[in-house]
């Protein structure tokens, strides 16, 4: 992979995720104004990979990313990165908290500093910007309808801003999970500490429908690490389920679960198997190992070929 897209400019949390993924010298970095723009460029072949936020420990799933991956030309996740998110309130030199009437930042950041804002700048207006770092950059160039930006400490420094307050996130231990997305191609190797992401579309709405889907995982000892319902956007009340699972599609139990889902769902969208950022190995419940599945399959093959 040589061209990586991300929400720019440099200094965003997404750029930090890309720093963690890709050694500084390797590959070209291409900035975009939104997750959608990066994924459109990826689908068109203009870039080879895109780093996008998918889940936040405070706010949950990132809808823009989940929805962009659930429809359109197929894309797959090939890796994940966890970034601890710390926010500062930054402004040009000489600005004090009293001078701040409006604050610019990305909507994810605003959602995570609401408590601090209510306590310290209750009257401040929120101005949405394309990213945290773009809010900081605009302050440096003096062309913005706000006096302060919420951004990463590194973005404040990069743009010569003063930090009016630091650690302003409502949850100090907030973490955002980013994924590197690519066009389908080679599957990342199985490591034993993998995750698989799928989107499930039901055939028709009926009592127990979600339970039927989840039974496919439960029966094979597969743990879920995220489950979200998202509107399909076709009609009111029509939802699909975006799910992260422990394991790799090359694991027998996971492959069998996907086959079970393929039979009962209108559509199973495979969004990739990739190594977990925390390297935590999947717990394999008794009688659900590859060896257990292979032995059962060998037994069936034997019967089918006239044995017992
Ligand atoms: O604007 C940024 O810096 C981003 O990368 C988006 C974002 C904002 C806040 C938390 C995580 C990601």
Image (cartoon, rainbow, N blue to C red):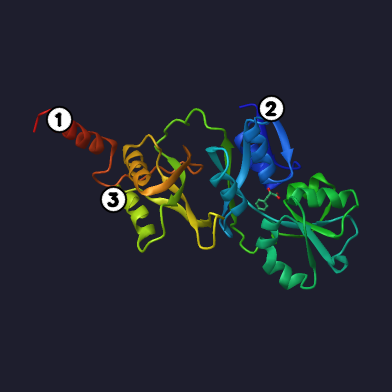
User: Where residue 207 sits: x, y (%)?
Assistant: 36, 64
Task: Tell me the distance, in whole angstroms, between the alpha carbons under discs 3 and 1.
Answer: 24 Å
Foreground of the two, 28 or 26: 28
Seen at 48% across and 54% down, the residue is: 240
- What residue is shown with label 1? 302
Q: Secondary structure at mark 3?
A: loop
Quarter of the image where one finds residue 98: bottom right
Q: Left or right: where does residue 160 sit relative to residue 289?
A: right
**Nearer the observer, 43 or 206:** 206
Q: Looking at the image, which residue is at 43% across and 44% down?
A: 280
Relative to residue 93, is residue 58 drawn left or right?
left
Marks 3/2: CA–CA distance? 46 Å
Q: Residue 63 location, x and y as percent? A: 59, 54
Classify mark 1: helix, strand or loop.
Answer: helix
Establish if 119 lies above or below 32. Answer: below
Q: CA distance from mark 2 to mark 1?
A: 55 Å
């Amino acid at each position: 992979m040589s061209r990586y897209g991300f929400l720019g400019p440099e200094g965003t949390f997404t750029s930090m995720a890309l720093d963690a993924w890709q050694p500084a010298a390797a590959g070209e970095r291409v900035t975009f104004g939104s997750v959608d723009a990066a994924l459109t460029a990826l689908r068109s072949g203009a870039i080879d990979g895109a780093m996008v936020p998918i889940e936040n420990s405070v706010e949950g799933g990132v809808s823009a990313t989940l929805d962009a991956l659930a429809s359109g030309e197929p894309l797959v996740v090939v890796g994940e990165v966890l970034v601890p998110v710390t926010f500062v309130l930054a402004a040009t030199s000489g600005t004090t908290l009293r001078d701040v009437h409006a604050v610019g930042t990305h909507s994810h950041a605003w959602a995570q500093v609401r408590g601090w804002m209510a306590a310290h700048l209750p009257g401040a207006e929120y101005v949405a910007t394309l990213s945290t770092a773009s809010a900081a950059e605009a302050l440096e160039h003096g062309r913005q309808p706000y006096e302060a930006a919420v951004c990463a400490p590194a973005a404040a420094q990069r743009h010569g801003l003063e930090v009016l307050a630091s650690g302003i996130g409502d949850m100090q231990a907030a973490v955002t999970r980013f994924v590197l997305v690519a066009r389908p191609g080679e599957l990342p190797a199985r490591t034993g500490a993998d995750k698989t992401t799928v989107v499930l579309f039901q055939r028709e709405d009926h009592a127990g429908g979600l339970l039927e889907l989840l039974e496919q995982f439960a029966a094979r000892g597969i743990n879920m690490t995220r489950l979200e319902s998202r509107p399909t956007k076709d009609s009111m009340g029509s939802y699909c389920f975006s799910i992260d699972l422990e394991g790799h599609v090359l694991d027998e139990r996971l492959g069998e679960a996907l086959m079970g889902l393929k039979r009962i769902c209108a559509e199973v969208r495979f969004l990739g198997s990739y190594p977990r950022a925390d390297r935590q190995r999947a717990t394999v419940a008794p009688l659900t190992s590859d060896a257990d599945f292979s032995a059962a399959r060998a037994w069936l093959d034997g019967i089918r070929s006239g044995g017992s």
